[in-house]
Amino acid sequence: MAQDIAIIGVGTTGFRATTPDLSYRELTYEAAKKAYLDAGVEPKEIGAFVATSEDFCEGYSIADEYAPDQLGAVLKPIYTVSGDFIHSMASGVMMLKSGLYDLVVVQGLSKASNMVTKPYLTDFALDPIYNRPLKELSDYIAGMEMNRYLYETGTTREQCAQVVVKNKRNAMTNPLAGHGCELNLDYVLDSPMVSYPLSELDISPYSDGAVVIVMATADTALALSDKPIWVRGIGWNSDTPGLETRDWGRAVYAEMAADMAYKMAGIRSPRSEIDFVEISDEFSYKELQHLEALRLCSPGEAGYLTVEGATELTGDLPVNPSGGCLGVGCLLECTGGQKVLDVVLQLRGEAGKNQLQDVTTGLAMSWRGLPTTTGAVAILSN
Amino acid sequence: MIDEGRPMMISPEAVLKTTTKIKLNDIQSGKVLSVHDKPNLKYAWDNGVAIGRYLAELKNGKIIGKRCNSCKRVLVPPRLFCELCWRPTDDWEYVQDTGTILTFVVSHVNWDASRVKKGQRYHTPAVIELDGAGKDQGILHLIDEIEPYDIKIGMRVKAVWKEPEERIGAITDIKYFKVIE
């Protein structure tokens, strides 16, 4: 019998551009300790653990073997998902729904600052035979996607730049965020061009940080927590990875992942049933493209909503109230972790100065970043 | 010592011989095309609080651990948390640079998987339980100044350090361990 699942504990280190003071083990330990305290559980009570890592991002091969110690998962059931945090969460949801365990922990970590040659890592993800030999900085993939997205929807560079202004401003009042600032539209538009139409400030910077959450089946959640956040739906999807065959204008992976999550959550009219979203904005246009893919507005409408202020903290569809990747920083495979964390904090009423009023349902969505066509969605309610 | 790039472990000829009718010449002549590339990936890992102190103390010629008052182990290398008790560790503690061999091998192959040549010494990495540190666990290092096949589990050993001015704050600040009894 399928069970309802809730998040009963969250912990994080916060997100900073560099963390030279702490090792990756120490970062995860801090987040885990806080999550277990928040949930009121000891690691020995937890049934299973799901970590998230990608060897090339960690700089270790078989990096998943290093996951147990800092989570309290030594000699416990644990495995690592090489995807985004929300994929790991989906794995945990399946374990709980199947009745295998009552408590499952999910972990995500970014030590992006330790990657000295980041652009080459994305380059090395391209097909070695027919893409990589062209030797172009891999940001061009985002530029080409942006160009096609703007072309198909009539969205403008100015509308994309407004996303940057909004998210970096939101991050100013989020103490967990590392890249907040007050910018005006012209400053963003005039920032150095990278791959036209993509400019430097359209690209989110990287951050370090860890997120750990504790999920539980309904009975356990209600026994342990007075503020469980229910996982109503979860979905994930991947388009063809080929640069030759993918859809350059639409984020079809996000549409499909969202449909899966909406169906599970019984959501038929996303715009009226979702109060706010934390979605992937690793590039400014991605926020708009994803917003449309999630069917929260029509194609070409997201840019107008942004300029009108509908996606601001005070708007009727707040988008990335935390500051998103542009304001918090891109967290590699922990990106979805930050999204889920901030949705939980909002639904608990613990989002501080960025707290939204009367929110009951939020959506977290991640994209695995360049050059992928993979996304995952989680829908949470209080 | 390890300072050269690691050459290809298996020759292309050997692979071709066992797996396919394609001849090496077919590839070299361009009859069968292939693409070669290697990653340009570099990392600078943050040591953090515990390992940062460990390395700094190695530079001082000392080995430091961190005690867990719950399980009574002194963890070397030190950690901010005990992975078994899952609690923050307590006091920093210096341990001895002497210890006991828990296990070892006599390795007839080099780091690059080539065979140790006649006249060269076999490699003898070991796990060494340090005096003052947790029981039945130890640090990984090398044994030297003894014939490889004379090494026995349970032998007592002591660190042979680099000269102070040569130390950089690395596990290789200890050159190797030598048998003392």
Image (spheres, grey):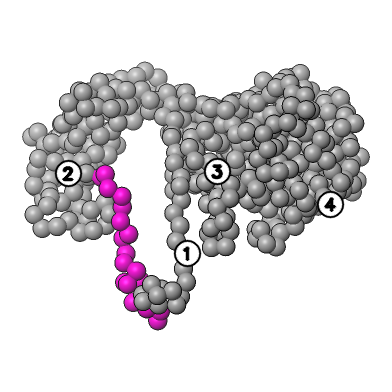
Give the amino acid type for the residue marked by disc 4 in the picture: Glu
Q: Pointer 2 indicates a residue of which chain?
A: B
What is the CA distance from the residue labelled 1 to the residue labelled 4?
A: 36 Å
Residue A170 in view of the camera: no
Q: Pointer 4 indicates a residue of which chain?
A: A
Lower sequence index among marks 4 and 3: 3
Q: Nearer the viewer, residue B123 or A131?
A: A131
Q: Are marks 4 and 2 in contact (CB under 8 Å)?
A: no
Instruction: Give SS at disc 1.
Output: loop
Give the amino acid type for the residue marked by disc 3 in the picture: Pro
Q: Which residue is mark 4?
A: A152
Q: Say the numbered circle drawn on residue A119.
A: 3
Q: Pointer 1 indicates a residue of which chain?
A: B
Q: Nearer the viewer, residue A347 or A299?
A: A299
Residue A79 left/right relative to B141: right
Identify which residue is drawn at 74% across, 23% down: A183
Q: Are marks 4 and 3 on the same chain?
A: yes
What is the CA distance from the residue labelled 4 to the residue labelled 3?
A: 28 Å
The magenta stretch spans residue A85: no
The magenta stretch spans residue B22: yes
* Rendered location of residue A36, percent (x, y): 59, 29
Q: Say the numbered circle drawn on residue B153.
A: 2
Identify which residue is drawn at 27% across, 39% down: B140
Task: Tell me the magenta residue range.
Answer: B2-23
Lower sequence index among marks 1 and 2: 1
